[in-house]
Amino acid sequence: MSKILNISEAVTIAIHSMVLIAASDKRLNVGVLARNTQFSRNHIAKVLNQLVKYGFLVSERGPDGGFNLAREADRISLLEIYESIEGSLDSSVCDSRCDLCLAYGCVFGGLSYKFQQEFRDYLRETTLKDIIKIKKL
């Protein structure tokens, strides 16, 4: 089935894991995150290691190890997490330069650009703490 908004599995893992970690009062390990998100342990570990590399998480090895936030939940936006996984979120207009659009304007009424801007604004303005408050985790 086709989707208008296509978010990669890696970004989904990153954001969901970060929310769970932010909502927890203790370190969470890959096994706990895998049970709660239903994603593979290997993919979660790979994504979380990238989040450690970018300074969002700190990790502790060992039997009581796991992951904690490296800074407060209200200081981490969803856009930062998204861009650490996918790179910069392009805010330009549609890549299509077809003759129809050039002659008549965007055949989709500029919706692609509007959706992109609204999505980017939401990610930029929403922090992990906001999500925790909304979902009351």
Image (cartoon, helix red, strand yellow):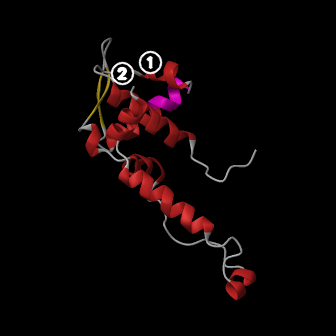
Tell me the residue at 66%/53% (across/down): 4
Crowding around mark 1 (Cα neighbors within 10 Å: few <14, some 14 to 19, many 20+) is: some
Q: Residue at x 43, y 58 (%)?
A: 121
Which residue bears the numbered disc 1?
32
Residue denoted by label 2: 28
At 48% from the left and 67% from the top, the residue drawn is 91
Side of 110 where 17 appears, left or right: left
**Contact (Cβ within 8 Å) of mark 2 with mark 1:** yes
Q: Is residue 96 left or right of residue 51?
A: right
Name the residue at the bottom extreme.
103
Work out which quarter of the rendered image holds the C terminus and state it: top left
Against 32, is 121 above or below?
A: below
Q: Residue furthest left?
A: 71
- Vertical arrangement, residue 52 with respect to residue 109, above or below: above
Q: Residues within 10 Å of mark 2 (few under 14, many from 20)?
A: many
- Residue 76 placement: quadrant: top left
Q: Is residue 43 magenta?
A: yes
Q: Quadrant of residue 135?
A: top left
**Residue at horizontal 51 percent and vertical 71 percent from the top:** 92
Magenta residues span 40-45
| Closest to the observer, 70 or 102 | 102
Amino acid type of the residue tagged 1 in the rendering? Val
Residue 9, how many percent across, how many down?
Answer: 56, 39
Which quadrant would the N terminus be assigned to in this image?
A: top right
Q: Quadrant of residue 87?
A: bottom left
